[in-house]
Amino acid sequence: MIALNHDLLVAGRDARRLAGRMPALLGRCSIQSTEVLLDLGIGLNPRDTAFAPLDLSELFGNDHPVVLEIGSGKGRFLISGATEQPENNFIGVEKSLHYYRVIRDRVAKRGLPNVRVINHDAFPVVQKMLPDASIREVHIYFPDPWPRPKEQKRRIIRPQVLVEIQRVLAAGGTGIYVTDHREYFENAAPLIAEFFRSEQRVPAPDEPPRTNYEAKYRADGREIYEVRFWK
């Protein structure tokens, strides 16, 4: 079953057809069969594939630009982006198995052929699975701030990760980092500036929230900090 998972994912044409048929297929499946179908068409667990490098044109069955989201939560950005931009492909990396399944199920119910979800910590996924200059956009929304000093080495905005983001971004590619954690922002912004052209900004009140966290934090009156960057 594991081998089938990987084989179908890298057979982009078959995976795209399966994603489009997913809503109808799910209605006829048992719970166990549903889990298998969803993973075959949408999800990828690198533990099963030994972090094999991805051929993104085969993965999606086309050569459309690819948007990467690191830490996808419940999938609000992925699903809205994939729905509004069918000309782009979207990859979400989500470490939580629970939220990975939430995203996978929501993508399947909508029959979105241009979304794939990877269940793992983002750093080895970016480092080992994504080819050079393969990503048009990188989005990082409200990553864990790891506020304790001894934990800060686990932050996603750190030199080792930024080196890999720089590698996978295509020429002219863009990135967005957003947080509500001021100390994290104050440390991350100058670090990003060491690797990319960048600018700091505060989202305007009339800008639509991109994630569930952003919607909640705005409603709570929290300040939101953003860095946009370019290769």
Image (tube, rainbow, N blue to C red):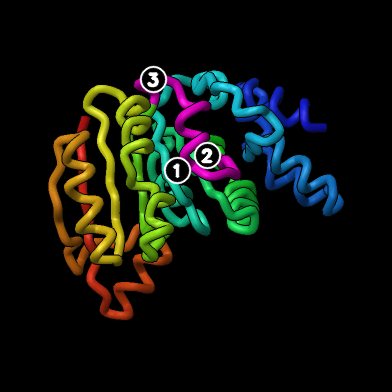
Q: Earlier in the sequence, mark 3 or mark 2?
A: 2
Q: Indicate the amino acid at tag 2.
A: Val
Q: CA distance from mark 2 to mark 1?
A: 7 Å
Establish if 53 lies above or below 106: above
Q: Please tell me which residue lies in front, 158 or 35.
A: 158
Task: Point out the stretch of residues depicted in magenta.
Answer: 117-134
Whether tag 2 and tag 1 are in contact, CB under 8 A, the answer is: yes
Q: Which residue is mark 3?
A: 132
Establish if 169 lies above or below 152: above
Q: Earlier in the sequence, mark 3 or mark 1?
A: 1
Q: Position of residue 179 (x, y in %)?
A: 30, 60
Work out which quarter of the rendered image holds the C terminus and state it. Answer: top left
Residue 32 included in the magenta stretch of the image: no
The count of marks equals 3
Q: Please tell me which residue lies in front, 225 or 160.
A: 160
Q: Indicate the amino acid at tag 1.
A: Ala
Name the residue at 40% across, 46% down.
81
Q: Earlier in the sequence, mark 2 or mark 1?
A: 1
Q: Please tell me which residue lies in front, 163 or 202.
A: 163
Is label 3 in a helix, a strand or a loop? Answer: loop
Q: Is residue 56 left or right of residue 24?
A: left
Q: Nearer the viewer, mark 3 or mark 1?
A: 3
Q: Which residue is mark 2?
A: 115
Q: Which residue is mark 1?
A: 82
Name the residue at 14% across, 36% down.
197
Q: Position of residue 47 (x, y in %)?
A: 67, 36
Establish if 47 lies above or below 103: above
